Amino acid sequence: MGNNIIYTKDITLYDLEKKFNLQLSEDGLFFPEWQAEPPEITPEEKKFLNLVKAGYMNLTKYPVMLENAVQLTVLSPLLHLSNLLLAPFHIRTQTSVRVTSMDEDITIEGRIDILVLEQNFWVLVIESKRAELSVRAGLAQILSYMLASPVPQKPCFGLITNGDSYVFLKLVIAESPTYGVSRVFDLMNPGNDLYHVLGILKNIRQLALNEFQVSPD
């Protein structure tokens, strides 16, 4: 049987379940990181995140907000505030990935929007969608990227956002790839859910520092 190329934008959860034995864990203990008590969000950070939310909500008044606008308006401030742009971390954009199924029947190819790394360890895979698309539209896509993690013995974390909504994922590949999903954080909710998003990003950063026993600056 020949090897078929499928691009990540066309992949489905059914494909991943059938060809990669991917399964969803609904055990609350599988993905505790998004529920853990985050480091303190300072009053200054909250004030800035309020401005980020206001700026994004202003953009939604105008038609067709593309993915790069989401990245510029919301993701860039969040990555700065979480210190994921500082050493020992760095980012790559439009990173090409490919992953082949266990039976070598299909190969998935695509490009990761934003990848946060510590050396060759994938700290966070980020998929941004257009504002009019549901974050669910990016679920199979980001999981296919995460399956390509070069350090499969370590958990890989992901974030999907369309600017309005934010959902985190955790994938443990091991012998049988298993993933968990956080609740959806949404800017339409009362208050500012960006506080929660930043807290989770800070938790993921600290986990990576602990993993490699790196002292923060």
Image (tube, grey):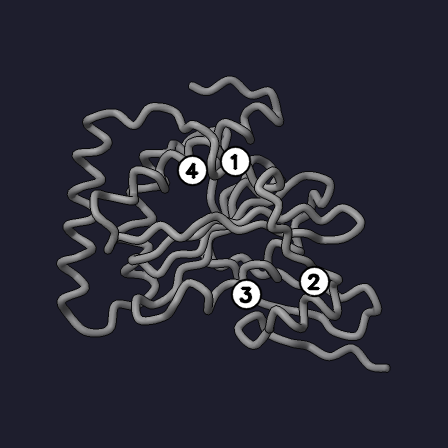
Q: Residue furthest front?
A: 27
Earlier residue among tags 2 and 1: 1
Q: Earlier in the sequence, mark 1 or mark 4?
A: 1
In this rendering, the label closer to the viewer, 3 or 2: 3
Q: Residue at x 67, y 67 (%)?
A: 16
Residue 100: x percent and y percent? 74, 65
Query: Which quarter of the rendered picture does the C terminus lie within?
Result: top left
At label 1, which amino acid type do we have? Glu
Residue 7 in sight here:
yes
Residue sitting at 68 percent across and 58 percent down?
Answer: 23
Residue 132 in picture, x, y percent from top left: 31, 71
Amino acid bearing label 2 = Val
Q: Which residue is mark 3?
A: 141
Residue position for label 2 = 99
Q: CA distance from mark 4 to mark 2?
A: 26 Å
Q: Residue at x 74, y 74 (%)?
A: 106
Mark 4: which amino acid?
Leu
